[in-house]
Image: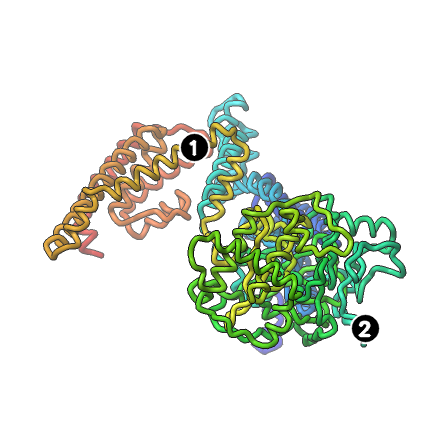
Amino acid sequence: MGIRERLAREWEEIIEKLDSPSREKTEESILLRVLVQTMVIVGIIATDVASGNPHPFSYWAVPLSIVGAVVSWKRRKEKNIGIKFALAFAMILTLLAFMSKLLQNLNDTRLVLAEYLIQLQVLHSFDLPRRKDLGYSMVIGLILIGVAGTLSQTLAFAPWLLLLLLLGIPTVILDYRSRMGLPPWEKTIARGEGGRKKLGDYWQYTPLSPRRIITSCLAIVSLGLFLFAIMPRYPSYQIQTFPVSAPEGFENLRFQEGGSRGIVNPGYNPDGTPRGEITGNARGVGGRVGSDTGEGKQEGLELGYYGFNSKINQNLKNFITEKKLVLRVRSQAPGFWRVLAFDHYTGQGWEISRENQTIDINRYPWSYQFNLSLPAFEGETKKIIQTYTVVRDLPNIIPSLSYPQFLYFPAAQVALDTEGSLRSPGGLLEGLTYTVVSQVPYRSQKLLQKAGTDYPDAITKYYLSIDPQLKQTLKVKAEELLEKAGRELPSNYDKALYLAQAMKQNYQVKTDFSLKEGEDLVTAFLKQGGGLPDHFATVYTMMLRALDIPARFVVGFDTGQFNPFTGYYLVHNTDAHALTEVYFPRYGWFPFNPLPGYEIIPQSFQDDNPFGVLGIFWKWIAGWLPSPVTSFITIVFQKITDAIARVVQSSLVAGLWRFITGSLVGVLVGVSGIIGLAFLGWLAIGMLRGVWHYRYLSRLQPPERLYREMLELLGQKGYPKNPAQTPREYSESLREFLTPQQQQIVSLICDSYVKWRYGGITPNMDYLYSQYRLLKRSLNRLLPSSASNK
């Protein structure tokens, strides 16, 4: 045969195969297909809701998926060669588009990957003839809901998660029926299989009973919440590509050449006074931070914080009248989100004396990473990664934990001032996301107590600056407060710590605080026995300077409220306040908070508790319970804790411990006792398991009890069932190990169980038990020979 004839014959064989009907076993359950498609739709919508996508995928993906599912059902018996070629070509184009978008979003690829997955699912929906193909779509729905969970900063995706769970339970049941080769569920209910005449009876016993599905859903949610509450929380961000995104027009923004690097607060002028008539625009030095209208000015006063400025006037009351969410922060540890620091006290406020000495920092065009130089200091540090999402427009200063090392920010340029604060060329706009990597120093009391007083000249020049007359007054007052300690305070750390506590105890927050024209704020605070909240940090800072301890005034946001479900700290405008940073030679700056109602040492990674979520849940539950109930539960737990402590501290336990650890004989007795107790415990557990197993089998229906007994018998003989196997798959896997008669009995019991469990057909139990006894005797009789053959 020549080459031409051979090629012609092979071509004819290919054409014949293409023309022949498909031999693939198709999925005939319409309900299963509808549920799977609905799961995918829920996943797509959840991704849109969680990401806040301005161009939702749902608008095109949902209708195309429905069209694809209809086409797939109509042509499930066909080979669909043309459709498959078209889908392959479309997938190649989709891949090229995906690679293009991926290169543009290297810092946060989650949404790009989700879009690519949705595109593939839409194409895949046009060719779903088999159950296995539907299984791929189920997995895609689960992946999309997982992506929604990582993208969401709120609980907006939670209802979609619950809906997916409600859909997933019947979907898995129908998929399992299909794997076992049972007819479609809708055909079973249509013909009333098993002799049931009433539809209500069928719904009572079917696995798809709404009552059973809802009960299973509630059990799963309850178990999930319990595990979520007790699971430890460890630092995340194990990868080095961090989320960065910006509103349109913000990316690659730079400072104007020769322009100001100053701060623009929409509610306050650069000199710290409230804005009068705002002239020009209020877009700041490169981006919007507020509106140039009267409405924008008023909003800046009512919602903005006066402290976010290069010069602040504390002879004003904070005009924040409405609590608003401004930031969502995902961080490896809690902390004070530092914004600005001030070095020069003006008598009625603070200013940054070296405002014109900011340093411009540029990043590479291909990366969002800014490299920030860290000051030289001793002591161990911990890398803390924080991601900030701006919910409400803020001035052009960038919150972060102290000592930022890397900044991932969409602008092309940022500025660093002399106090270690970061500034953006534009206001922080709503929707902006950036990431900071900080090297936060450990706060070791022993090391800081030994830090000494050898301050560099740059520190003494700016952070010990104080009017001589005011210094004398404050020094006398500070020493009076320190004398109340009743002991010697040898180190500056001890003095700073005790002085902060003394201010909390001896001064009060006074909303009616008034300051006469020309009067010094610190002096007025001492006379009136207190002042406004931020005045505490001012007075405390100046008292430390009077004691020759370098200090500076710092403003920022408190940690905020932690949401355990999303992992974000919710920071509001009312969380903005001031505290004091104290300098310790060789170790750097550490914060102290003298404000009543706050901890002296702000939250940090050293306070982070992996099991803290359980405490948050208890506080949340206790907030809903009546006070007597909360008190009763607290007392019960306290009694239990005290009882355990008394037992551990009792003389009997103490004497036994001394005997065991006091000699070699005691060690041997202790080890023997532990082994004996372990053995008795093992016996007790075995007996309890046996009793529980017997009671469990006794409560089962006869077909299921017989099936479980057979599985237990075969497992003891060395033929355990894999949990992933269906009963029929399991019986088929035993063909090479059992005799034909034994395998036939196993297959009979498995088939009877399946028909009873999913079809409602009651088998002849007397006959099945007689066959089971034959199987049991034959396995016991053939065990030695089969073992020798193995």
462 lies left or right of 721? right
Disc 1 element = helix
Provide residue 427's location: percent of width, then percent of height. Answer: 76, 61
The amino acid pointed to by label 1 is Ile
Say above or below: 6 vs 544: below
119 lies left or right of 496? right
Say above or below: 722 vs 708: below
- Gap between marks 1 and 2 measured at Cα: 63 Å
- List the single residue furthest toward the left: 665
Residue 84 in sight from this viewpoint? no
Say above or below: 696 vs 50: above
Provide residue 87's location: percent of width, then percent of height. Answer: 67, 60
Q: Nearer the viewer, residue 249 or 625?
A: 625
The amino acid pointed to by label 2 is Gly
Task: Determine which of the numbered discs, if any, sits on residue 789 in the image.
Answer: none
- What residue would you read off at disc 1? 633
Crowd band around label 2 with a 10 angstrom C-alpha radius: few (<14), some (14–19), many (20+): few
The N terminus sits in image quarter: bottom right
- What residue would you read off at disc 2? 259
Q: Earlier in the sequence, mark 1 or mark 2?
A: 2
Disc 2 element = loop
The C terminus sits in image quarter: bottom left
Provide residue 669's location: percent of width, then percent of height. Answer: 12, 50
**Quarter-wise, where is residue 755 in the image?**
top left
